[in-house]
Amino acid sequence: RYLSAANLEGTGYSAGYYQFDETGKMLTKDGPAFDCYFYYNNVKQLAYQLLPYNGNYYFIAENNKFVTSVSRNLSAAMVEGTPFPAGKYDFDETGALITKNGPNADGYFYLNGVKQRAYQLIEFEGDYYYISDKHMYCKGRAGYLNETIVEGKTFADGTPIPAGYYSFDKQGRMIINFVTVENIANVRDIGGYVTMDGKTIKEGLVLRGSEPDGAVLEGNVLNENGLNRLVNEYGVKTQMDLRAEGTGEAAPLGQSVLHKYYDAVSYDAIFTEEGKAKMKTIFEDLADESNYPIYMHCTYGIDRTGTVCYVLEAVLGLDTTQLQNEFALSNWYRTFKQKDVNKIKTGLTAYGGANIKENAALYLLDCGVTQAQIDAIRDIFLEG
């Protein structure tokens, strides 16, 4: 029966339709009911509202019935008075709003149930996620973040995130491998990347960066906090110094850390006989598990260090785009010539393998590194 305001005066109920059972007792409906209508204190609620009930939200559609198992675009007027902005929302089989938050299995990213749109870098539970083309978050690959996308975003230490290419792991988390070490620059962990084979390079094995002793870079001298960061927090056991013998201090990381010089070369110089001999020594030491964790550096941590890491990450299985993007992370610190980096790729490609991983292995074999040592490097670094 429809009961008017006059009929219900003094009862606490509003005018509306009410039902009564076989004994004449009024049936008090509240929330989503079996008849697919939604009630507050027996009052059927009207269309185009998002209404709360028992910790959930329900949407009343155009027929005054609440929706189930559907997606609906809700306008600002429809969500007024709720914590949700206008946007597209999903509702489950009971009609309850599915409040998705964060990266979802459907490939989209949600905040308070709202699907996020493309070209955003979103911080969520301590990690960054990039919403790429088609509004889907980037995972297991790299993406270019321009100045607009990174505006106002910082690393954990407060350093602004520069524009550039960044990689994202299998869960979509941005691989932030820059490491803050006081007084030395361009330090980052080479781990966290997903290879062509779907494996992940372990973190904490190799930190790469600039010289720690100020031999060339005035003021670029490891202080007590920086030393503690490398030796105690990261447990560095070996300093792989790619500079010439005798450059800088004899033991800038302390007596407990093995300091070894390699007088390395960079870019296409690694394909000369001298260059191959130097790379042989480096990769023989990289095959020795007892040397880890390692701090690898040259002067700026770009040319010689970048070249060695390019070949190392290639033999581990990163593709050419990832290798280029990882090298480019040094651009914020000091620019390099892209044509020089391309010479590494060209030199490796000349070995004729099926991909860059196979070519890097063929190159190392040509340097005199054994297959057993290549396998050992992969065993040390790869998981999954």
Image: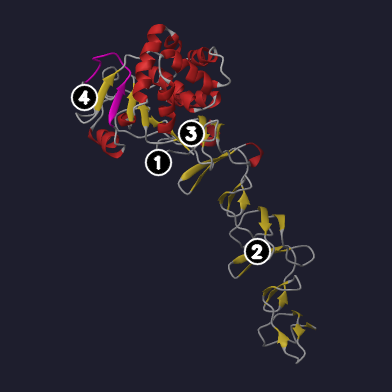
Q: How is the image coloured?
A: secondary structure
Query: What residue occupies the far top of the structure in this picture?
Result: 273
Q: Which residue is mark 4?
A: 251
**Sequence order check: which comes first, mark 4 or mark 3?**
3
- Do tag 4 and tag 1 residues touch (Cβ < 8 Å)? no
Q: Which span of residues is magenta-colored?
A: 237-249
- Give the vertical position of 372 relative to 140 (above or below): above
**Sequence order check: which comes first, mark 1 or mark 3?**
1
* Percent x, y of residue 193: 48, 33
Instruction: Name the foreground residue: 201 vs 334.
Output: 201
Residue 81 in which image quadrant? bottom right
Q: CA distance from mark 4 to mark 3?
A: 31 Å
* Percent x, y of residue 261: 28, 18
Q: Which residue is mark 1?
A: 156
**Sequence order check: which comes first, mark 3 or mark 2?**
2
Binning the other alpha carbons within 10 Å of mark 4 as few (below 14), some (14 to 19) or many (20 upward) gives some
Q: Amino acid at mark 4?
A: Ala
Of marks 2 and 1, the one in the foreground: 2
Q: Main secondary structure of the magenta part?
A: loop
Q: Which residue is mark 2?
A: 96
Q: Amino acid at mark 2?
A: Ala
Of marks 4 and 1, the one in the foreground: 4
Q: Which residue is mark 3?
A: 193
* Percent x, y of residue 178: 40, 33
